[in-house]
Image: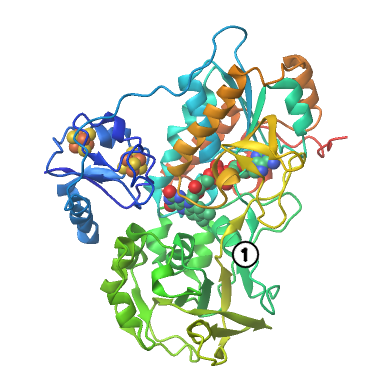
């Protein structure tokens, strides 16, 4: 029986090149690459060699016969992709895009951030060039959203973090964790030491919606919620975020995968979370949670829903509660007419009448609602607004209705934050760039030596895998510029740089950070969990045997 690609696939295409019979598609050079949620194995061609399973960083590929329950639907999903004949019998010519003139000293590249995008970038540079790499991370621990964003019950996805450990420990890598670029060291200073600086700082800003009462304590941002259930280290001097769990109903605004993560995590049986890497304190809070219903609202019709097929498909099984669609006139017909493959899962969910103006029905459930948004929140009392009437343009006023006390989670996306020393577009909330090169808006030309990868480059869209090919394209730009002689030769020596940075903050090296990760894993093993996380910056620094000696000395 063939191998099958399952839920956690992040479409990074690592498996494609190892398949000896070219039976995993779409490949990055095929036109439909990037249009599907995952890649698919052709069961008629697969020879069961297992090479792809070894190559997959998120353990998404398994032999079909070990799948159980709803996960068995991935067998058909993989096969269905090949129902329409594809012209893919031939391999394309190999391409070696990373090439650099070998004369002179190796390039020194600074990478800002240590999330998936930065880590993929470092990995490509180490494996395909002779560059030296320096990774700067504001937290004392690497990983970005892999550690503090991906939901705790997505253990196989989080396993990707271990695929990057060798990158941090590589002899050509230097690591500067607990160093915030723009605060502890400036871009101008980095440019004195490095030929190029690549920013992969993610998109950590909260998008706003603009309703009355957005600042009410009952309204929280999904970024804080996922940080809370993932044990994101609290900033020194800032009280850790605590999710309000005292109301029976939570309304999530937005219907992408982050909204589903939040809904599932709030309602899943505590026992199923207790053996994840969710901090033990959060598990205890959830044990006493009053939340029984999570209403996930999309402002528009079902055809605009943003979740991916694998996540929605597995939701009833992973959340272990009812998942229903709120009934309204015409919704069944709309769902029946959906053509996009990823939306067809909606047709398998029950459509039921929901009275949001009354307390939630007994039991636990996730309600998917459409054409509805938040109207206002006043002292914890929430009103919603139907957008359907306005969209229909029939002159009817939008229908607003109160649903009483609820917690509102804004899962309406993230924005790139401004970075000191870089241009920033206040309207789009993006750093202007082209092919990964930062663009000076006053001239419309690239600023030599400064580049972007990952969510900082693309905005907050795309899963983990998207960052792999994206980082390769930025590396191409760096190497092109190096070959064209556009990168300035750095002037600062290693010793001067070390002195500069050590004078500013307590640098955590990879060796110390990996030691902390090992300690977390060891503590976790004792209690049957993947890891027991340290959840504050001070704890992490102490665990890396670096007690904070003093306050930071900011730039200047
Ligand atoms: C809640 C959530 C769940 C997700 N779940 C999945 C999933 O299950 N599967 C999937 O495929 N994708 C998932 N994604 C998407 C995935 O996480 C992103 O594609 C990916 O993390 C983007 O990587 P990045 O490196 O650009 O950003 P990030 O992961 O955010 O990394 C940025 C890093 O830069 C650091 N940094 C920021 N500013 C500075 C500075 N000034 N100096 C030094 N360091 C700095 C940050 O601390 C962080 O470590 C999820 C996203 C979110 C928000
Ligand atoms: S098991 Fe082997 S033949 Fe089958 S998809 Fe994976 S790599 Fe290809
Ligand atoms: S995550 Fe990458 S390696 Fe794993 S199945 Fe998906 S595309 Fe293949």
Which residue: 49% across, 18% down?
Answer: 99
Q: Position of residue 333 (x, y in %)?
A: 30, 81
* Residue 250 image position (x, y, % from top left): 52, 76
State the residue in front, 313 or 287: 313
- What crowding class fits label 1: few (fewer than 14 Cα within 10 Å), some (14-19), or many (20 or more)? some
Is residue 415 left or right of 263 when viewed as pictured? Answer: right
| x and y, in percent, of residue 257 in the image | 44, 60
* Extreme-top residue of the structure: 103
216, 191: nearer the viewer:
191
Question: Which one is nearer the viewer's eye here, 252 or 83?
Answer: 83
Quadrant of the rendering where the N terminus is positioned: top left
CB of mark 1 near ligand 1 (< 8 Å): no
Tell me what residue is drawn at x 39 percent, y 40 percent. Answer: 12
Q: Taking 322 as reference, is 53 above or below it?
A: above
Please tell me in which quadrant of the rendered image residue 292 appears.
bottom left
Residue placed at 15% from the left, 43% from the top?
A: 2
Q: Position of residue 255 (x, y in %)?
A: 46, 67
- Res. 12 visible in picture: yes
**Of 289 and 507, which appears nearest the observer?**
507
Q: Is residue 187 left or right of residue 469?
A: right
User: Which colour style is shown?
Assistant: rainbow
In the image, is residue 138 above or below residue 478? below
Q: Give the position of the C terminus as an image quadrant.
A: top right
Kindly state the secondary structure of the residue where label 1 is placed.
Answer: loop
Instruction: State which quadrant residue 52 falls in.
Output: top left
Looking at the picture, does residue 376 appear above or below residue 189?
A: below
Eyeballing the image, is 203 above or below 440? below
Q: Which residue is mark 1?
A: 242
Does residue 253 appear to the left or right of 191 in the view shown? left
Residue 59 visible? The answer is no
- Marker count (numbered): 1
């Amino acid at each position: 029986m063939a191998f099958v690609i399952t839920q956690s696939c992040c479409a990074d295409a690592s498996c494609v090149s190892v398949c000896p019979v070219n039976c995993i598609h779409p490949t990055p050079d095929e036109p439909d690459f990037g249009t599907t949620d995952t890649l698919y194995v052709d069961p008629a061609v697969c020879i069961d060699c297992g090479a792809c399973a070894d190559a997959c960083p998120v353990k998404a590929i398994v032999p079909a016969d070990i799948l159980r329950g709803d996960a068995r639907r991935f067998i058909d999903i993989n096969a269905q992709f090949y129902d329409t004949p594809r012209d893919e019998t031939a391999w394309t010519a190999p391409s070696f895009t990373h090439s650099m003139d070998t004369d002179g000293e190796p390039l020194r590249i600074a990478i800002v951030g240590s999330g998936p995008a930065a880590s993929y970038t470092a990995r490509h540079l180490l494996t395909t060039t002779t560059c030296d790499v320096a990774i700067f991370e504001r937290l004392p621990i690497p990983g970005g959203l892999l550690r503090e964003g991906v939901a705790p019950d997505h253990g196989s996805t989080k396993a990707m973090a271990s695929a990057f450990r060798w990158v941090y420990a590589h002899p050509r890598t230097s690591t500067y964790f607990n160093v915030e670029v723009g605060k502890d060291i400036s871009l101008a200073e980095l440019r004195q030491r490095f030929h190029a600086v690549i920013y992969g700082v993610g998109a950590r800003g909260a998008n706003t919606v603009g309703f009355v009462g957005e600042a009410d304590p009952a309204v929280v941002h999904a970024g804080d919620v996922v940080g809370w259930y993932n044990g994101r280290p609290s900033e020194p001097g800032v009280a850790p975020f605590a999710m309000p769990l005292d109301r029976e109903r939570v309304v999530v605004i937005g219907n992408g995968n982050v909204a589903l993560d939040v809904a599932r995590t709030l309602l899943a049986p505590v026992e199923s979370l207790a053996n994840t890497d969710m901090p033990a304190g959060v598990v205890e809070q959830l044990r006493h949670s009053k939340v029984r219903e999570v209403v996930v609202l999309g402002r528009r019709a079902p055809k605009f829903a943003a979740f991916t097929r694998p996540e929605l498909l597995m939701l009833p099984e992973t959340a272990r509660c009812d998942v229903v669609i709120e009934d309204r006139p015409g919704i069944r017909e709309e769902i029946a007419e959906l053509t996009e493959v990823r939306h067809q899962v909606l047709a398998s969910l029950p459509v039921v009448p929901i009275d949001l103006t009354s307390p939630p029905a007994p039991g636990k459930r996730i309600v998917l609602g459409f054409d509805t948004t938040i109207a206002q929140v006043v002292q914890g009392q929430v009103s919603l607004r139907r957008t359907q009437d306005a969209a229909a343009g029939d002159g009817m006023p939008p229908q607003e209705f109160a649903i009483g006390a609820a917690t509102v989670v804004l899962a309406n996306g993230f924005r790139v934050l401004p970075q000191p020393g870089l241009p920033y577009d206040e309207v789009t909330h993006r750093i202007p760039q082209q092919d990964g090169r930062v663009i000076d808006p006053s001239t419309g030309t690239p600023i030599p030596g400064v580049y972007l990868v990952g969510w900082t480059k693309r905005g907050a869209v795309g899963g983990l895998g998207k960052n792999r090919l994206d980082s390769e394209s930025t590396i191409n730009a760096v190497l092109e510029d190096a070959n064209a002689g556009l990168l300035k030769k750095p002037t600062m020596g290693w010793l001067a740089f070390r002195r500069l940075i050590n004078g500013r903050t307590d640098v955590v090296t990879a060796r110390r950070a990996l030691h902390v990760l090992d300690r977390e894993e060891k503590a976790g093993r004792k209690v049957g969990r993947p890891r027991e996380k340290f959840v504050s910056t001070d704890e992490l620094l102490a665990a890396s045997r670096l007690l904070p000696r003093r306050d930071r000395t900011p730039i200047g």
